[in-house]
Amino acid sequence: MIVNRSIPALPNAWICLAAIAAVLIGLAAPVWAADAPPNIVYILADDLGYGDLSCYGQTKFATPNIDRLARDGMKFTQHYSGSTVCAPTRSSLMTGQHTGHTPIRGNLEQRPIGQAPLPAEAVTVAELLKRAGYATGAFGKWGLGPPGSEGDPIDQGFDEFFGYNCQRNAHNFYPKYLFRNREKIELNGKTYSHDLIAEQALEFIRRHKDGPFFCYLPVTIPHAAMQVPAAYHDPWRKKLPQFEGKIGRYSHGTKVINPVAAFAGMMTKLDEDVGRVLDLLAELGIDERTLVVFTSDNGPHHEGGHDPVFWDSNGPLTGHKRDLTEGGIRVPMLVRWPGKIAPGTASDHISAHWDVLPTCCELAGIEPPAKIDGLSFLPTLLGKPTEQASHAWLYWEFTEQGGKRAVRMGPWKAIQHGIAKRPGPIQLYHLDKDLAEQHNVAAKHSDIIALAKQAFAAAHEPSARFPLPAID
């Protein structure tokens, strides 16, 4: 028998202690089957533009923790939101349907609280994952139905919800109340809501570390009002004195705050909390079993004193929130899944929020519903581009501002305004040559305009709640 004399033999008592420790460690760590479905953390920022992350070109402040997702995973350069405002984007995300089909196609308010509810017959990604054995939690802004309505998140597949049920109330980061499921949680109006929402999401992950879980985190940063605690606001105000000409006030008191400086502070806070999520996954030993997505619900806003021009919030794109130009609907998307997604990769695969539902279904090993518009982008994530299905076109319609619609077909983008009453001419842009959509080439491409009209007609399903006329 050969004995390695360089390693001293352990006393019997030490051997017993080591064995006990090994057992305890094994009990503490999640035990995963090799083919078990992954946990899914989906972080949806609110009104964050294509240029608002340093990994997408922002130079005036840094987002190092969000950038970790790009460094460790995949950066999408042609990902689109479900709509150009809050509620229809969330409806598209939940149902896997674009705004020609999804039940909620605009911000339709209800009193005293909430927005038009998702109908009971809607099938959401949360419902599907719950049926597949996932614990499901939503933390942040809902906007798809008041408490107790058929659109209540608890009746749309979520085991638990914490945050703003009504997106109108989310215009204040120091609210008098939030909701836990259907229970109204009274607050003192002095607590920063994002902090409470982040803590609840982290606690959900801790409780469900044995998985699988779906943690939907539709945070309210950086939506207006432009509010952030002084520890995040004041350094930026001192650092950039040119902000002094743009002063506002907190809606919860008299503390003077600069809304432009507050934006950088809000982004710093959001970035820190994304880092906390990533650190917790590593701490719990579930990093490699968890897919993390970070994206935004639409393009950057210019409300509450926010200055998207100063911050170059839409990057190389034209337009903002409520526009169907690229600046209103093209959004960042970063996806990280250690050991599955190659680090530091980028994809120009054309995708949209309605692709999330079928992607989650494929991750969970279940079939998506038949009546969806999305295509799973899992093959792209796993580095299998030859297996990736592609969209013939992407479609948006929007009932505000006289009504408008847009379609993306390969490199072409067609937009039409005024469709609620007097439809204007269809504009056409070649995005590969004109990303900023500055040169309307419709007059030169009647064949592409004809295809756009066909796509408009095929994509639109009439809605009594959100009426738009059929295209001629």
Image: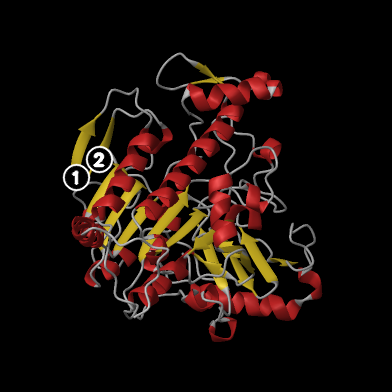
The location of residue 279, given as percent across then percent down, is 43, 49
Point 44% across, 67% down: residue: 356
Point 22% across, 71% down: residue: 131
The location of residue 383, given as percent across then percent down, is 56, 77
Q: Quadrant of the C terminus?
A: bottom right
Q: Amino acid at mark 1?
A: Arg
Where is residue 253, by image quadrant? top left
- Residue on which the image places disc 2: 179
Point 54% across, 56% down: residue: 69
Q: Are marks 2 and 1 in contact (CB under 8 Å)?
A: yes
- Decide which of 199, 85 is in the foreground and name it: 199
Q: Secondary structure at mark 2?
A: strand
Q: Which mark is residue 182?
A: 1
Residues at marks 2 and 1, CA–CA distance in whole angstroms: 6 Å
Point 28% across, 46% down: residue: 203
Residue 392 lies, with reference to residue 329, above or below; the image says: below
Q: Quadrant of the N terminus?
A: bottom left
Mark 1 surroundings within 10 Å by alpha-carbon count, few (fewer than 14), some (14 through 19), many (20 or more): some
Q: Amino acid at mark 2?
A: Phe
Q: Secondary structure at mark 1?
A: loop
The location of residue 51, given as percent across then percent down, is 65, 49
Where is residue 324, by image quadrant? bottom right
- Decide which of 69, 92 is in the foreground and name it: 69
Q: Is residue 402 visible?
A: no
- Decide which of 372, 396 is in the foreground and name it: 372
